[in-house]
Image (cartoon, rainbow, N blue to C red):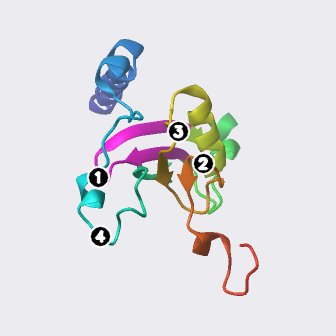
Amino acid sequence: MAHLCMFIRCFNQILNAVTSPPFYKTYVKLPTQSTPLDPHITNNLKLFPFFKGALGALDGTHILACPPSSDRSCYRNHKGGVSQNVLAATTFDMHFFYILSGWEGSASDGGVFHNACVHDLEIPDGKYYLADAGYPICDSLIVPLWCLVSPLGVGN
């Protein structure tokens, strides 16, 4: 048990260090308007020019959580498990460059995305991320139409 407590303490210290403003502002670089398009897109005739402004992909995932019993109901996800909703954005070569964690499992992907945009996720004009139907239709996300409409033409 002592080893587990020491692990948790060390993990929290490392997490606090890498998410502190001095570290984050120095080492985390979000794409800008002048960020070049990924060669994976520019060199592929099936993708270029269709994904000309794409920065990468954005999605949420649920990670098991052990919140205090008083908060447990907020962390219960739509499948009945207790988790936290984590938003992540990757480049096309699978490098993570944005992660927002800590949201309750009951939080919607769109709600977590909205919070990210309000606080620190900046998406330059003319650029966008690929996302799924859990996200809003807006200028900064491309959501595939087949995710939004059933074969009968009725929304999911």
Considering every residue shown, the one lying at the far front of the view is 49
Among the 4 quarters of the image, the one containing residue 28: top left
Task: Kindly identify which residue carries mark 1.
Answer: 94
3D distance between C-alphas at marks 3 and 2: 8 Å
How far apart are the alpha carbons under marks 2 and 1? 23 Å
In this rendering, the answer to whether 7 lies above or below 17 is below
Asked whether disc 1 touches disc 3, contact meaning CB atoms under 8 Å apart, the reply is no
* Callout 1 amino acid: Met
The residues tagged by marks 1 and 4 sit, at their Cα atoms, a distance apart of 20 Å
Mark 4 — residue? Answer: 45
Q: Which of marks 2 and 4 is in front?
A: 4
Tag 3: residue type?
Asp
Query: For mark 3, what is the residue?
Result: 125
Q: Where does the magenta region start and end?
A: 84-102
Question: Is label 2 in contact with label 4 (beta carbons under 8 Å)?
Answer: no
Q: Does the magenta stretch include residue 98?
A: yes
